[in-house]
Image: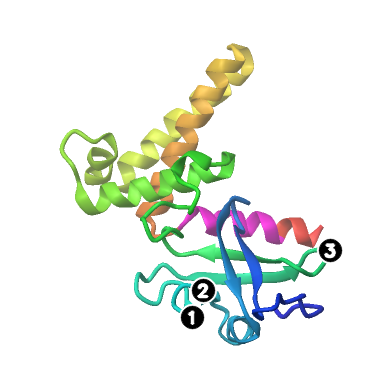
């Protein structure tokens, strides 16, 4: 998790850092780091940065708990920008959004992670009238029944219905799969990591 070559720090001893979600590929935030921040990142596995406004080192999540577990660090072709690939815990932005660029910047993968966040929120708050809250209250068996029904609908749509209908049924299946993972205490990332390991094994 250390850089292959030292980045080109500016006259202040800083280098911009682009933080990317490993699973979705979304850019979560942009910050700055100095040598010590990069050293601490490598030593702890958690993203550290340099605050230009406070003039101090800081670890992402030290007050919010929304840490960034760093998977990979690499410099760009000119060595004047660093990319940190991370597994985030909670929102990356201090305003509570998943990224510092707002909720409207979701990629295809990011939509699924926003869905996962929403399911967890519904589980905590259990608002009246929420389908997710009702499904969670019925327990895992109810979700598994829905998965079976939706999987059948996907097969039928794929065999002889429109592309739009297939996409709708696939969305329903993905939704209920995400609920089931939450009920079992697993995340979407755990499933994606299995796919990643399989890809690397080929």
- Callout 1 touching callout 2 (CB < 8 Å): yes
Up-down: is 126 above or below 128? below
Residue 136 place in picture, x, y as percent = 27, 45
Q: Earlier in the sequence, mark 3 or mark 1?
A: 1
- Between 60 and 13, which is closer to the camera in this rendering? 13
Number of residues whose C-alpha sits closer than 10 Å to that of mark 2, classed few (under 14), some (14–19) or many (20 or more): few
Residue 48 place in picture, x, y as percent = 54, 77
Is residue 122 within the magenta segment? no
Residue 115 place in picture, x, y as percent = 42, 43
Is residue 93 shown left or right of residue 87?
left
Spatial separation of the CA atoms under disc 1 and disc 2? 5 Å
Indicate which disc residue 14 carries: none
At x 58%, y 41%, the residue is: 107
Is residue 188 within the magenta segment? yes
- Between 147 and 111, which is closer to the camera in this rendering? 111
**For mark 2, what is the residue?**
52
**For mark 1, what is the residue?**
55
Judged from the image, the secondary structure of the residue bearing numbered disc 2 is: loop
Number of residues whose C-alpha sits closer than 10 Å to that of mark 1, classed few (under 14), some (14–19) or many (20 or more): few
Q: State how many labels appear.
A: 3
At x 42%, y 58%, the residue is: 91
Judged from the image, the secondary structure of the residue bearing numbered disc 3 is: loop
Is residue 123 shown left or right of residue 195?
left
Q: Which residues are magenta?
A: 187-197
**For mark 3, what is the residue?**
77
Residue 184 place in picture, x, y as percent = 39, 57
Up-down: is 86 above or below 165? below
């Amino acid at each position: 998790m250390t850089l292959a070559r030292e980045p080109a720090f500016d006259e202040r001893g800083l280098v911009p850092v682009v933080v990317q979600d490993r699973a979705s590929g979304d850019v979560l935030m942009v910050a700055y780091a100095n040598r010590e921040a990069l050293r601490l990142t490598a030593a702890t596995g958690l993203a550290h940065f340099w605050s230009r406004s406070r003039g101090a080192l800081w670890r992402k999540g030290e007050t919010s708990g929304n840490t960034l577990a760093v998977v990979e660090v690499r410099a760009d072709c000119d060595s004047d920008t660093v990319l940190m690939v991370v597994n985030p815990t909670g929102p990356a932005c201090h305003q509570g959004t998943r990224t510092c660029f707002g909720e409207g910047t979701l990629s295809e993968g990011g939509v699924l992670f926003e869905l996962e966040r929403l399911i967890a929120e519904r589980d905590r708050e259990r608002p009246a009238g929420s389908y997710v809250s009702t499904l969670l209250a019925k327990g895992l068996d109810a979700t598994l029944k829905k998965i079976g029904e939706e999987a059948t609908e996907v097969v039928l749509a794929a065999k002889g219905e429109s592309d739009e209908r297939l996409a709708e049924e696939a969305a329903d299946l993905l939704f209920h799969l995400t609920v089931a993972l939450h009920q079992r205490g697993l995340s979407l990332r755990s499933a994606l990591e299995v796919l990643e390991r399989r890809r690397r094994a080929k």
